[in-house]
Image: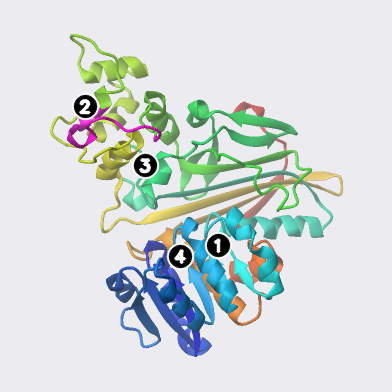
């Protein structure tokens, strides 16, 4: 049997493992599911005859190398910074590698050696990055094949709570890594290009500069700018494009409310707050407000944020129980961002019966035969439950499909790469439709960019 080593059995691996096990008989596969927690690996394999769960500490080099040497192909579902040692072992033992993570500088260095050994190191084959690349390149390639010239490309993606589970004033719950949500937009100004002009949005104003999107059947959304919209300009072959923008999707009103935390300084991760372990939620809030001999924390908060007691923004803050005297942070040596994450997790954690939702939206502006047109491509995916979430499905399924295509020699281009070639995106996008990941495309006249949006 052909052996697939899956390293990491976390949340994103559930749909990946289920898919490969469903193909194991017809494709002659045996899965080795490795995790630091044997119990977690066992839970994900569910006593399937074509799967073996094992405990693996990736920092134990002999154990790691032994597992990789026995495999036909390796999938790493570890955090991005842990892929590199796996990749080096794959080079040593001549094994293909698949990950859902961004290509790091350290991974890119291995490109030449991977090519020399005719090895495929497929990265960025999850959701975002992953499905965004594939769905975008499919349309861009089709436009170019007809002689069209790209004028505009906008791409938006968001992990949200499904409408039937949307029951708080923020219209949001954590569907993935909470820390990434709290730190979103930090590390420099957001950068994009609009009508041939470079534009920048500093972190302090990022969440007040949003674009509105409408998705049929799901209503209105907003999007704030990703930090670097130009990262893939050359990779997509869009060096001459006039407008290029990538953003993160939320429900309308989220960004304005989140901006309150940004302005107060609660999302800062650069310093530790004294005695954070014994701090109450109310004391945490008061730490960012000026002293006043008589005004309460609530009054000071409203004054500094310039919001009234009957403002929906105030109701959103109250819903988070921010002013509670009794709730303790219970985090030693914590940064403001870590404390805020803890507080939000009380209210924004998905309940056992909650479902998540992925929304992806692309806009393609182009000129063909002297006529300007636009294609809007939209995808909505709803999770099944807390194990087979929309996030796990859209991250894990492309990884699994790419792995099988590599094993079956349908993907053959060697080297460190991302899924922008037709040999990768065509079969995967087609198969994803069978699992409810469907892009609906609509052609309309192109009127250019609306300057009022920025």
Q: Which residue is mark 3?
A: 171
**Looking at the image, is mark 4 or mark 3 nearer the viewer?**
4
For the residue labelled by badge 2, is the local secondary structure a helix, a strand or a loop? Answer: helix
Q: Are marks 3 and 2 in contact (CB under 8 Å)?
A: no
**Looking at the image, is mark 3 or mark 2 nearer the viewer?**
2
Marks 2/1: CA distance?
47 Å
Q: Residues within 10 Å of mark 1 (few under 14, many from 20)?
A: some
For the residue labelled by badge 4, is the local secondary structure a helix, a strand or a loop? Answer: loop
The quarter of the displayed image where residue 424 is located = bottom right
**Looking at the image, is mark 2 or mark 1 nearer the viewer?**
2
For the residue labelled by badge 1, is the local secondary structure a helix, a strand or a loop? Answer: loop
On screen, residue 421 versus residue 15, left or right, reads right
As displayed, is residue 201 above or below residue 93?
above
- 4 or 3: tag closer to the N-terminus: 4
Which of the pair 406/311 is nearer the observer? 406
- Residue shown at 72%/55% (left/top)? 140
Magenta residue span = 269-284
Q: Which residue is mark 1?
A: 438
Asked if residue 432 shows in the view, the reply is no
Q: In this view, which residue lies farthest toward the top? A: 293
Magenta-drawn stretch contains 383: no
Q: Which residue is mark 4?
A: 77
The quarter of the displayed image where residue 275 is located = top left
Marks 4/3: CA distance?
29 Å
Q: How is the image coloured?
A: rainbow
């Amino acid at each position: 049997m052909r052996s697939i080593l899956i390293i990491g059995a976390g949340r994103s691996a559930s749909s990946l493992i289920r898919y490969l096990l469903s193909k194991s008989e017809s494709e002659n596969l045996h899965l080795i599911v490795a995790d630091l927690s044997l119990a977690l690996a066992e839970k994900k394999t569910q006593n399937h005859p074509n799967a073996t769960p094992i405990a693996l500490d990736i920092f134990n080099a002999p154990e790691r190398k032994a597992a990789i040497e026995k495999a036909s192909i390796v999938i790493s579902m570890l955090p991005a910074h842990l892929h590199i040692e796996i990749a080096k072992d794959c080079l040593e033992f001549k094994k293909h590698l698949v990950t859902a993570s961004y290509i790091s500088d350290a991974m890119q260095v291995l490109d030449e050696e991977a090519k020399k050994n005719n090895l495929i190191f497929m990265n960025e084959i999850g959701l975002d990055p992953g499905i965004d690349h594939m769905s975008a390149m499919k349309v861009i390639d089709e436009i170019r094949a007809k002689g069209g010239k790209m004028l505009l490309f906008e791409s938006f993606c968001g992990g949200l709570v499904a409408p039937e589970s949307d029951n708080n004033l923020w219209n949001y719950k954590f569907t993935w890594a909470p820390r990434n949500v709290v730190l979103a937009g930090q590390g420099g100004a957001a950068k994009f290009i609009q009508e041939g002009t470079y534009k920048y949005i500093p972190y302090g104003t990022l969440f007040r500069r949003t674009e509105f999107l409408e998705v049929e059947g799901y209503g209105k959304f907003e999007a704030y700018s990703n930090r670097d919209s130009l990262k893939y300009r050359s990779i997509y072959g869009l060096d001459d494009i006039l407008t290029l923008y990538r953003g993160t999707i939320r429900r309308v009103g989220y960004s304005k409310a989140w901006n309150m935390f940004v302005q107060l300084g609660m999302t800062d991760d650069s310093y530790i707050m004294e005695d954070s372990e014994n701090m109450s939620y109310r004391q945490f809030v008061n730490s960012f407000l000026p002293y006043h001999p008589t005004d309460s924390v609530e009054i000071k908060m409203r004054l500094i944020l310039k919001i009234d007691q009957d403002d929906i923004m105030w109701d959103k803050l109250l819903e988070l129980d921010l002013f509670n005297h009794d709730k303790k942070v219970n985090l030693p040596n914590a940064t403001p961002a870590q404390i805020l994450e803890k507080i939000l997790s009380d209210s924004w954690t998905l309940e056992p019966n909650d479902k998540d939702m992925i929304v992806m939206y692309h806009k393609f502006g182009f000129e063909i035969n002297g006529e300007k047109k636009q294609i809007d491509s939209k995808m909505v995916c709803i999770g099944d439950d807390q194990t087979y979430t929309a996030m796990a499905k859209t991250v894990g399924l492309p990884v699994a499909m790419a792995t099988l295509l590599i094993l079956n020699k349908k993907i053959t281009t060697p080297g460190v790469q991302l899924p922008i070639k037709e040999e990768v995106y065509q079969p995967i996008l087609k198969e994803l439709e069978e699992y409810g990941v469907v892009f609906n495309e609509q052609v309309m006249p192109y009127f250019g960019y609306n300057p009022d949006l920025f």
